[in-house]
Amino acid sequence: MSTAVPIIRSAAEGEKRWFYGGGTHTWKATATETGGAFLLFEDRMAEGKMTPLHRHPDADEALYVLEGEILVRIGDLEERVGPGAVTLSPRGVPHAFLVLSSEARLLCLQTPAGSEAFYRAASDPATDKPDASRVVDFGRVQESAKQHGAVEILGPPPFEPA
């Protein structure tokens, strides 16, 4: 029997967290709410935000681009994608992305939902202050990855400087 609970959230609803890898998450469905089946959050980021090359050993990660454009690398594949595009990084496959537009909004689905503790430890509740003024702290992200094991940081972003 599932332990998931019914969820109905408007576009503006969900717990908002500033992620120290850059960007603001709005959590749409948490591990507890989905009975561990998945974690779903919206990620709003500014131009130039990029992830280090990393992988999720125990989760598949799908991204759906709501707004903007990103350059994504998954394994040996690299492509620019925009609104309506979907990417899938299967568990264990190295991947990264770079925001190319002035802003990007992605919907991120990770299944199963084993990475919530990583994101909580690498973020703070978002405030009314503009998040763009916050400083990215990959040290905090890396420490959370080591502590929670849901993400393995493999190296720097794999993208050539502009």
Image (spheres, helix red, strand yellow):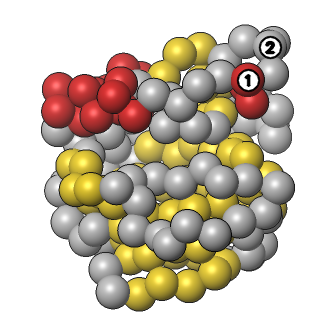
Q: Examine the rendered structure and indicate whether residue 112 appears above or below residue 80.
A: above
The residue lying toward the viewer, choosing from 111 and 106, is 106
Q: Determine contact: label 2, label 1, CB under 8 Å.
A: yes
Q: Examine the rendered structure and indicate whether residue 50 appears above or below residue 98.
A: above
Residue 153 image offset from top left, x and y in percent: 25, 49
**Count of numbered tags:** 2
Q: Quadrant of the N terminus?
A: top left
Q: Is residue 20 left or right of residue 65?
A: left
Query: Residue drawn at (30%, 51%), measured in percent from left and top?
Result: 112
Query: Residue drawn at (32%, 39%), measured in percent from left and top?
Result: 115
Residue 89 image offset from top left, x and y in percent: 37, 70
Q: Examine the rendered structure and indicate whether residue 72 appears above or below residue 6.
A: below
Q: Tell me where residue 13 sits by quadrant.
A: top right
Query: Residue drawn at (33%, 86%), measured in percent from left and top?
Result: 76
Res 133 label: 1
Q: How much space separates mark 2 and mark 1, taking CA atoms?
A: 8 Å
Q: Tell me where residue 22 sits by quadrant.
A: top right
The residue lying toward the viewer, choosing from 149 and 80, is 80
User: Regarding mark 1 in the picture, which secondary structure is present there?
Assistant: helix
- Say which amino acid is labelled 1: Ser
Residue 10 image offset from top left, x and y in percent: 81, 37
Q: Is residue 119 left or right of residue 24?
A: left
Q: Is residue 48 left or right of residue 3?
A: right
User: Regarding mark 2 in the picture, which secondary structure is present there?
Assistant: loop
- Say which amino acid is labelled 2: Lys
Query: Residue drawn at (65%, 60%), measured in percent from left and top?
Result: 99
Q: Is residue 26 left or right of residue 133?
A: left
Local packing at callout 1 (Cα closer than 10 Å; few below 14, some 14-19, many 20+) is few
